[in-house]
Amino acid sequence: MSQKETHSISVALAAATCTLLGSGISATVDAQEEPAWDFNTSLLYYGEDGDRVKDFSVSAIARRMFIDDRYLTLGLTIDGLTGATPSGAIRQDVAQTFTRPSGNAAYSVAAGVLPLDDTFKDTRLALTAGWQQPVGDTSQVSVGASASKEYDYLHLGVNAKFARDFNQRNTTVSAGIALSMDSLDPVGGAPAPFSPMLDVGDTSNRLGDQDKDVLDIVLGVSQVISRDLVVQANYSYSKSDGYLTDPYKVLSLVDGTSGDTLLRSIAPGVDGPSHQFLFESRPGERTKHSIFGQAKYYMNGKVLDASYRYMSDDWEIDSHTVDLRYRIPFGANRYLEPHLRFYTQTDAEFYRLSIPDSLPLPGHASADYRLGNFDAITAGLKYGWRTRNDNEMSVRIEGYRQTGSVPADQLIGNQVSRDNFPDLNAIIVQFGYRF
Amino acid sequence: MKRTVGVGAMTILLCTGCSSMGVEPWERDVLAKQEMQLTTDEIEAATDDHIYFSKEASSGGRGFGGGGCGCN
C-alpha cells in the first residue's frame, strides 16, 4: 500500500469516526447546512441554614450557529434573593437594637445571638450577549457585553478575547480583557466610612450614589498532551477602583478591656441603636493576581477534571482552591459526577472583629466574614442523562460549608469565650436542561 | 540583555516542547467529546462562579472574575 493510500484511509477513518461520535467536524457541517439555536437552561436553589440567604435562580443561554463557525450567544439570569446576612456586629450578652440600612426603622437581636441584617431582599436581572468568529485559519475573536440590575446596584460591562491555535491546533494561546462599570445606590444612601450608625430618621451620614470600576485581564494557554489529556493554565489580573466598601456592614465599637460593645444613649421617644456601631471602611483600590491550572483526563469513558487556583491580592488575602470532578458513565446515556472542592483563604490586613475604643481608628476596617480567615468545602453529586429526544438533563445536589476563626490577637476580654465567626452551611440544588 | 536571551530561549524551548506534544487531527475523537471540553457546562460554571464570588474573597481564574453583582 502506498503512503498516499494509507493517508487517505486515515482521513476517511477519521471522518467516519467523527461522524459516528457526533464530534466537532460533523456538528460544523450540520451547522453550515441548518443554522439553529441551542439552549442551555437551569433552575437553581441555593439555601443557607438558619434564616440566612436563599436564592432561587433561573438561567438560560441561547446559542445560534451561523455559517463559517460564527456564534451568537445570549444569556439571561433572574435571581430572587431573600434572607438575612451577618451585619458585622458581634454577639453580646444583652439584646442589641440596630437601625435598618434604610434608616427608616429599627430591629432587635436577642442576647447571645449573632446579629443578622434581615432586610436582605433583592431581585437581580442579568443579561449577556457575545459574538464569536474565526479570524483566518487559526485564530478566533470574541466580543461581549453584560449588564445586570439589582434594586441597589447596576453593572455594565464589555469584554473581548483573542485566541490563536498553533501546532495543528494542539496549542491555543489566548488573551482577554473585560471592563466593568458599576454603580451603587444603596438603600438609604451609602454611609460615610467609619460614620456611626444613627437614630431612625437621621440620614446625615449618608453619601450619594457611588461607582466601582473593574479591569480584568486573562492570559491563557491550553495544550493537548495526548489523545486523552488536555491541560490549560491561566494568569489573571484584576484591578478594582472606587467604592469597594459594603454599605450594609458595620463594626462594633468595644471597650478596650472587656471587649463588650459600648452602650449608646438614646433620647426619649427616639428609636435607634442600643450600642455603638461604625460603618465599615475598605480601601478604594484592590489588585488581584490569580494563577489557574486545569487538567482533563479521559480514562476508558470516565473523565477526571482537576483544577487549582492560587489568588493573592494587595489586601493581603491569599487563597487556594482545588476543584475535582469525576464523571462516571453508566448505561448508554447516563452518568454520575461526584464533585469535591476545597478552599482556604487568609484574612485581609484590615479585617477586624471589632474596634476597641482604647486605640486610634485604623486606616480601614471591616468585620465582613468574607474577608476573614476561613476554609470551605463543597461536596456534591450530579446525575445526568440523555432524553429520548436526544436532549440532556441533569440534577446536582451539593453541600457547601465554611468554617473560620478570628485571629487570637484580635480577641478582647469577653470575646475570647464567644463564638465569633459566623460559620455557614448551604445547600445547592440545580436542574439543567439542554435542547 | 542576558534576561531577554533567557526569556527568548525559554519561549523557544516551551514552543518546541509543545510542538512535540499533541495529536494528529484524526486522533481527536476523545478530545471532541463534550465531557472533554475545558468548560463542560457553561451555566453550571457561571453559577459556581457567582456563588463563590458572593461568599468568598476570591473570584475568576478560569475566566473573568470582575464585578457584575452587588453581593461582594
Image (cartoon, helix red, strand yellow):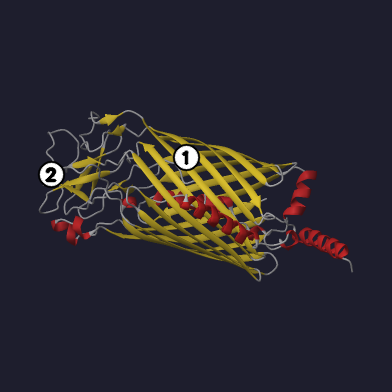
For the view shown, which residue lies furthest in the bottom direction?
Answer: A300
| Residue A321 rendering spot, x and y as whole percentages | 44, 59
| Residue A346 rendering spot, x and y as whole percentages | 33, 56
Please state which of residues A304 and B12 is positioned toward the viewer in this rendering: B12
> Disc 1 designates what residue?
A124
Left or right side of A308 for A413: left
A193 up-or-down from A38: above or below: above
Picture quarter with the N terminus of chain A: bottom right
What's the residue type where badge 1 is placed?
Arg
- Report whether mark 2 lies on the same chain as mark 1: yes
> Nearer the N terminus, badge 2 or badge 1?
1
Could you say which quadrant of the image residue A421 lies in?
bottom left
Badge 2 marks a residue whose secondary structure is loop
For the view shown, which residue lies furthest in the front direction?
Answer: B1
Q: Residues within 10 Å of mark 1 (few under 14, many from 20)?
A: some
Left or right side of A223 for A184: left
Task: Please give the label number shown on residue A34.
Answer: none
What's the residue type where badge 2 is placed?
Leu
Could you tell me how many numbered marks the image carries?
2
Residue at horizontal 34 percent and vertical 51 percent from the top: A370
> Disc 2 designates what residue?
A263
Residue at horizontal 36 percent and vertical 51 percent from the top: A52
Disc 2 chain ID: A
